[in-house]
Image: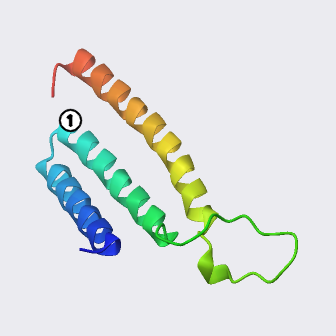
Amino acid sequence: MSVELMLAAAIAVLVACALYCLMRGRLFDVIVGITLLSYGVNLFLFAMGRPAANRAPIVPAHGSVVPAEYVDPLPQALVLTAIVIGFAMTGLMVALVIKRVQSKGEG
């Protein structure tokens, strides 16, 4: 099985589980669903950067460069930023749910 097929299968499983959790309607399940969906999107962005390429994106001082042989660093930077933002948003959602449960006594 190729790496691309495994990445596509992992993305599909994460998105399917996220949609299932989002459709349940309970607050905790919605938080888990949003988190899983963000993981699926992050994995998709990472897969767009050709993780199986041959070389790191370090350009030599002389000689010609073939861009197809290098890994694209932009998706990796986007994923790193998205992980930090996703962690902060998950923490905010958990804090809001805890505050709602304490004030209304609902789940």
Name the residue: 18% across, 55% down: 17
For numbered disc 1, what is the local secondary structure? helix
**x and y percentages locating residue 81 in the rendered image:** 56, 48
Q: Is residue 104 left or right of residue 90?
A: left
**x and y percentages locating residue 25 in the rendered image:** 15, 46
**x and y percentages locating residue 10 in the rendered image:** 26, 62
Q: Amino acid at mark 1?
A: Phe
**x and y percentages locating residue 101 in the rendered image:** 22, 21
Residue closest to the far right: 62
Up-down: is 18 above or below 9?
above
Q: Is residue 78 left or right of residue 64?
A: left
Q: Quadrant of residue 4?
A: bottom left
Q: Is residue 15 left or right of residue 42?
A: left
**Mark 1: few, some, or many residues within 10 Å (few <14, many ≥20)?**
some
Residue that carries the numbered disc 1 in the rendered image: 28
**In which quadrant of the rendered image does the N terminus lie?**
bottom left
What is the tally of numbered marks visible in this picture? Answer: 1
Q: Quadrant of residue 23?
A: bottom left
